[in-house]
Each structure stands twice: as structure tokens, then as C-alpha cells.
Image: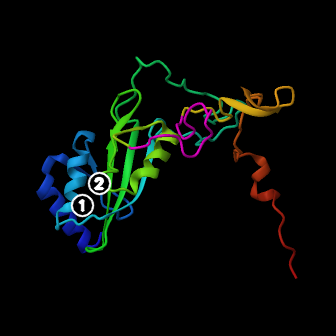
Amino acid sequence: MTTSHETLAARLEARFGDIVCRVPSTCGELTYEVGKEDLLEVGTALRDESDFGIDQLIDVCGVDYLTYGEVEWTTNTATDSGFSRGVERKPVILDESDTFNPRRFAVVYHLMSVANNTRLRLRVFTGDGNPPIVPSVVAIWNSANWFEREAFDMFGILFEGHPDLRRIMTDYGFIGHPFRKDFPLSGNVEVSYDADKGRVVYQPVSIEDRTLVPRVIRNDNRYSADLKDTAKDG
């Protein structure tokens, strides 16, 4: 971590106290977590106060932590059932009465100060609401407009106060949000041209599920050193 970023960290903690919480980093990035109820206050201060001067929003991205920390591929034995999440699918939440894990969905903001030559990341969790909602920061950094639309399209995260929140990557009739970890690998519907109707139609997916089986290195006699070819002497 550079001296300028440590200075920024000290200013952040002195200014906001418990409102922000520093997230440990393994790559030298300065990252703080902030509650969504404090996002607009913190963002406005970061932009307007000279101690920070965060005048540019570089990127906004969504994150789905549904399977965070789970390992699919660690194994020492063969299997005929596979380890892919495409085999054991978790149900998609459709009922409005259902709630999410409060720390499942997050929005990450990549920020920069040109004057101070510093970078900062903010992470905001959406809470347990269904659908997940966070405030829009378009009024603070206008460049967030299309980034927030992309996070909405891919993850289904709503941005309250966004001036034109609609899909930006997928088709108009697309069902679901493809970057969610519980989104079916083969999708929900497929499109084809119907000659009788003279137009493109949607229909159920016809792709059959398949089991993905990883290669497993086995410790048996086939890998014995005695069976390996050896170079002949001179």
C-alpha cells in the first residue's frame, strides 16, 4: 500500500468513523464497506471534500456471493456424478415473500481522484430484500448510469433513483439474470424462427443437461516410476 493510500485511509476513518469498515486486501487495493443507507452521504463527501477529491467513478459492478468459499473441484477420487453447479442446481427465488441472505449480493464502486492520484473501492451489500435494492449514485457520478444498468441486467439489482433503469445487455424478452450463481447454465428459454408465424418465437430450452466430470489424477501402478521410459546410455 502506497503512502498516499494510507493517508487516504486515515482521512476516511477520521471523517466517517464507524460508517465505513476497511476490508482486508491481498493485492494492495484500498477497499471499504459502507451500508447502503449511508452510501449517498459518503459518496457526496468523497466527491466534494478536498481531503478526498474523488471526481471520477471508473466502474460499478455487481457481485453474487451465493457459492463464495465453496469448492467444487477439489477431489482425489473419480466420480460419475460430476462436480459442476450445473448438476446440482439451487432453486431460483421467484416468490416475492422470499428473502435473500443479507450478504449475498453486493455492488462495488471503483473510484479515483485525479488531483490526489489515489484510488478507492467501496462495497455495498444489498441486504435481504427481494428484489435487492441499493441507491443510485448517478446524481453523484453521472458515469454510473450504464454501469448500474448492466448490474441490474446481469444480477437483478435495482438502483433506486436511477433515471432510466432497463436492460442493456440482454434481449427484451430475456428471463432471469445470467450472472446470478443460481441461473441455469443452459438458460430458461431459447429462440428460433417460426416459419408459420413469420417471426422469432421463444420456447423452452431443448438442451439436455450433461454431467461435467473433471479429470482426476490417480495414484496407481500406471504412474509408477518403474514403468517410465528411460534413456539408453550412449
Q: Where is residue 167 in the image (x, y as percent from the top left)?
A: 53, 41
Task: Say which mark, if any, is on residue 226.
Answer: none
> Mark 1 Cα within 10 Å, few/some/many (few <14, many 20+)?
many
Residue at the spot of label 2? 140
| Amino acid under disc 1 | Arg
* Residue at screen point 35% across, 28% down: 128
Q: Where is residue 200 in the image (x, y as percent from the top left)?
A: 76, 33
Q: 85 or 214: nearer the eye?
A: 85
Residue at the spot of label 1? 47
Residue at mark 2 to residue at mark 1: CA–CA distance: 8 Å
Look at the image and give the residue range highlighted in magenta.
163-181
Q: 71 or 101: nearer the eye?
A: 101
Q: Where is residue 49 in the image (x, y as percent from the top left)?
A: 17, 63
Q: Does the magenta stretch include residue 177?
A: yes
Identify whether 50 is placed above or below 207.
below
**Residue lying furthest bottom in this view?**
234
- Which image quadrant for residue 213? top right
| Amino acid under disc 2 | Ile
Asked whether disc 2 touches disc 1, contact meaning CB atoms under 8 Å apart, the reply is yes
Q: What is the secondary structure assignment of the residue under circle 2?
A: loop
Give whichever of discs 2 and 1 has the lower sequence position. 1
- Which image quadrant for residue 162? top left
Q: Position of residue 78 (x, y in %)?
A: 70, 37
Q: Which colour scheme is used?
A: rainbow
Q: Which quarter of the rendering shows the C terminus?
A: bottom right
* Residue at screen point 11% across, 58% down: 14
Q: What is the secondary structure assignment of the residue under circle 1?
A: helix
